[in-house]
Amino acid sequence: EGDIFLIPMHDGRFAVCQVICALRDRFKKAFSFGVMSIQRDETVSLEDGKFLVYSYGKRKSSVIFTSPKLLKDGTWSIVGNIPLTPAKKELQVFQCAGGVYNGDEFIRMVPPEEYSQYVTMGVAGFELVQNHLLDMSKNQ
């Protein structure tokens, strides 16, 4: 958590991202991150910033869940680490199939009417990640 990494975008720009949740147990095939900026070059100043927001259907979010494969193989390069702020640590709490988790730790089950109170884990494929990045860049 806290690692800063770059995602090369299809249009030649770069998304500067920060790992929110490095999941290890039941969700080890996913991790969550936020996007701090989208820029034309790979220069990164390791300063904390708010996460950009994207739209997905009717929902707006600043958290993306995806596979760690491209981080592990170096396609997305880690360039530093900034400790998560308390507000960003709150984004480690998410809902998945009615269960609320803080990272890998199960907290409790919640009824469907409470789902919208939490970030929802929906693991995006790499093309969907690119689509979210494009959406964020329109709002930047």
Image: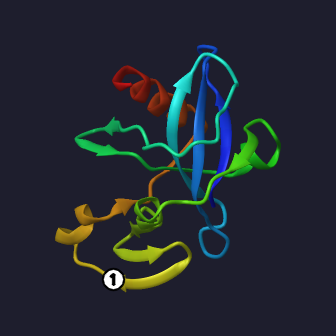
* Number of numbered discs overlaid on the protein picture: 1
Q: Residue furthest right?
A: 73
What is the quadrant of the N terminus in the image? bottom right
Q: Most extreme residue toward the left, as rendered?
A: 113
Q: Image height check: is 57 above or below 84?
A: above
> What is the three-letter code of the residue carrying label 1?
Met
**Residue drawn at point x = 36 percent, y = 60 percent:** 119
Residue at image position (73%, 46%) is 80
Q: Helix or strand or loop: what does disc 1 sit on?
A: strand
Task: Report x, y in % for residue 5.
Answer: 68, 41
Percent position (x, y) of residue 32? 54, 55
Between 135 and 67, which is closer to the camera in this rendering?
135
Q: What crowding class fits label 1: few (fewer than 14 Cα within 10 Å), some (14-19), or many (20 or more)?
A: some
From the viewer's perspective, tell me whether residue 110 is left or right of residue 68.
left
Label 1 belongs to which residue?
Answer: 109
**Which one is nearer the viewer's eye here, 28 or 39?**
39
Vertical arrangement, residue 44 with respect to residue 17, above or below? above
Q: Quadrant of residue 52?
A: top left
Placement of the C terminus among the 4 image quadrants: top left
Residue shown at the point (47%, 83%) measured from the top left: 106
Q: In this view, does 108 lie above or below 23?
A: below
| Residue displayed at 67% across by 71% down | 24
x then y, percent, for residue 138: 37, 20
What colouring does the structure picture have?
A: rainbow
Q: Position of residue 121 (x, y in %)?
A: 44, 59
Give the image quarter of residue 58: top left
Say left or right for 131 vs 53: right
Position of 81 with respect to 139 (left or right) is right
Q: In this view, does 21 lie above or below 82?
A: below
Q: In this view, does 81 lie to the left or right of 119?
A: right
